[in-house]
Image: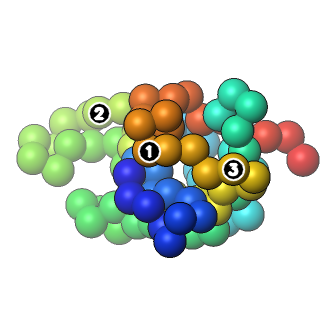
Amino acid sequence: MYDVVGKGYLLQLTEVEGLPRKGAMLGMGSDTCRVIEVLRNSTDGRAVSDRSCLTGRPVSPYGAVLVEWIGDVPLPKDVFGRWVKEEAR
């Protein structure tokens, strides 16, 4: 997870359900952020991958998104390990 000019983060996602999309609103408890970029995995170029790059065996779906925080930006330590869920529009 990397700080994005004090406004958001790059979130490494594990156990992804579905496909992240630009503009999606994500919730983490009472915190909210907006996906501003869906990144591609270097292993296969997909937004969500489900194979290990070292063994080629199945793993939990993973990917990364760049997000912009809505409201107060929490410290990285307060975001690490939290469950992220897409908010209904």
Residue bearing mark 2: 59
> Which of label 3 and label 2 is nearer to you?
3
Amino acid type assigned to the residue bearing label 2 in the image: Val
Amino acid type assigned to the residue bearing label 3 in the image: Asp
Q: Is 80 positioned to the left or the right of 44 in the image?
A: right
Front-most of 55 and 3?
3
Marks 3 and 2, how far apart at CA: 34 Å
Q: Residue at x 46, y 51 (%)?
A: 11
Marks 1 and 3, how far apart at CA: 12 Å
Q: Is residue 86 visible?
A: no
Q: Earlier in the sequence, mark 3 or mark 2?
A: 2
Q: Is residue 3 above or below residue 17?
A: below
Q: Is residue 66 above or below residue 29?
A: below
Q: Residues within 10 Å of mark 2 (few under 14, many from 20)?
A: some
What SS does tag 3 mark? Answer: loop
View extreme (left): residue: 54
Amino acid type assigned to the residue bearing label 1 in the image: Pro
Measuring from the top left, give residue 71's x and y in whole percent: 75, 52
Q: In which quadrant of the rendered view does residue 76 lie?
A: top left
Q: Residue at x 50, y 71 (%)?
A: 5
Q: Earlier in the sequence, mark 2 or mark 1?
A: 2
Front-most of 35 and 63?
35
Residue bearing mark 3: 72
Tag 2 and tag 1, C-beta contact below 8 Å:
no
Q: Is residue 54 visible?
A: yes
> Which of label 2 and label 1 is nearer to you?
1
Q: Residue at x 49, y 34 (%)?
A: 78
Marker disc for residue 76 = 1
What SS does tag 2 mark? Answer: strand
Marks 2 and 1, how far apart at CA: 26 Å
